[in-house]
Image (spheres, rainbow, N blue to C red):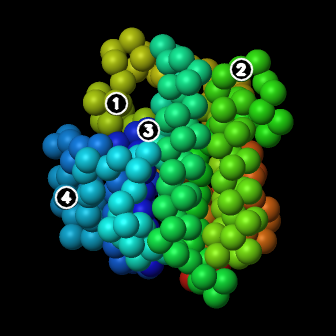
Amino acid sequence: MKVLLTGATGAAGLPILRNLLGDPSVSAVTVLARRPLPAWVALPDTGAAHHPKLTTVPDTDFLHYSPQMQSTIAAHDACIWALGKSTAGLSEAVYTELTVGYLDAFLGAVKAGGAGSKENPFRLVFISGNGADSSESSRILFARVKGKAENNLLASAKASEGTLKATVMRPSYFFPAPADALHQRGRLMRIADKTLGALLRNVLPFAVISNDEIAEFAVRGAKGQWESRGEIFQNTEMKRLVKEAVKNATTGPRDEL
């Protein structure tokens, strides 16, 4: 299986990248990014920002995909869309472009490139967030814009008549691994993560999810494992399904529940 990944250096994207590279059923991973992976990224087997299964396509224009890029997309079986950014300091127009515009452009490239078929659909796993509003009417910017992105993805999947399959993940709080946080977070944010993370794990464990759980769910979603269970998955359901899947993997093939 060949998988595309966006947001590869983020708190969710990096553990997903590591999971993909460590999965023997994944033959190739292509990262779409604005720039090459930074030197601090440590990947399985190599311990560095390179891997024999990994290709990075830097200078990606997330609003425009050339015919060559459309063909590149179509040569893959799935995409995990982990590209995202906080609303802090962003106008609604900018945040909407980053969240909805980028995804819409990619969906257009998937269609234009002829990715997927009814027999072997192209699968797209979208990392959304807890509180995303499907009605798109929330007063909270994050909620209504993420809801719009979800709706556009699900509408594209429906219109494809089976050639595109969508899985939407709505994780609650998650935090980067300490070694990664040194490069992904500022000092004050790292302190806040540590304090809030400890509090939530002790008081509201259902409201947090680990990076490993996110990665496992996303990669299994790219294989179509959750499609019989729906399209949108909330935090607690993802945690439960991953726990079941990992437990059952000890007595059967990794992809079976």
Secondary structure at numbered mark 4: loop
Name the image quarter holding the C terminus: bottom right
Question: Which is in the foreground here, disc 2 or disc 3?
Answer: 2
Q: Earlier in the sequence, mark 4 or mark 2?
A: 4
Q: Residue at x 18, y 53 (%)?
A: 48
Secondary structure at numbered mark 3: loop
Q: Earlier in the sequence, mark 2 or mark 3?
A: 3
Q: Are marks 2 and 3 in contact (CB under 8 Å)?
A: no
105 or 198: nearer the eye? 105
Q: Residue at x 66, y 54 (%)?
A: 153
Q: Residues within 10 Å of mark 4 (few under 14, many from 20)?
A: some
Q: Are marks 4 and 3 in contact (CB under 8 Å)?
A: no
Q: Residues within 10 Å of mark 2 (few under 14, many from 20)?
A: few
Check disc 4 and report the residue beneath it. Answer: 50
Secondary structure at numbered mark 2: loop
Q: Residues within 10 Å of mark 1 (few under 14, many from 20)?
A: some
Q: Residue at x 54, y 41 (%)?
A: 101
Check disc 1 and report the residue beneath it. Answer: 184
Secondary structure at numbered mark 1: helix
Check disc 3 and report the residue beneath it. Answer: 11
Q: Could you give the CA–CA distance between mark 1 and mark 3, rounded to whole angstroms?
A: 7 Å
The location of residue 15, given as percent across then percent down, is 42, 50
The location of residue 28, given as percent across then percent down, is 34, 73
Question: Which is in the foreground here, disc 2 or disc 1?
Answer: 2
Check disc 2 and report the residue beneath it. Answer: 140
Badge 4 amino acid: His
Badge 1 amino acid: Gln
Badge 3 amino acid: Ala
45 or 109: nearer the eye? 109
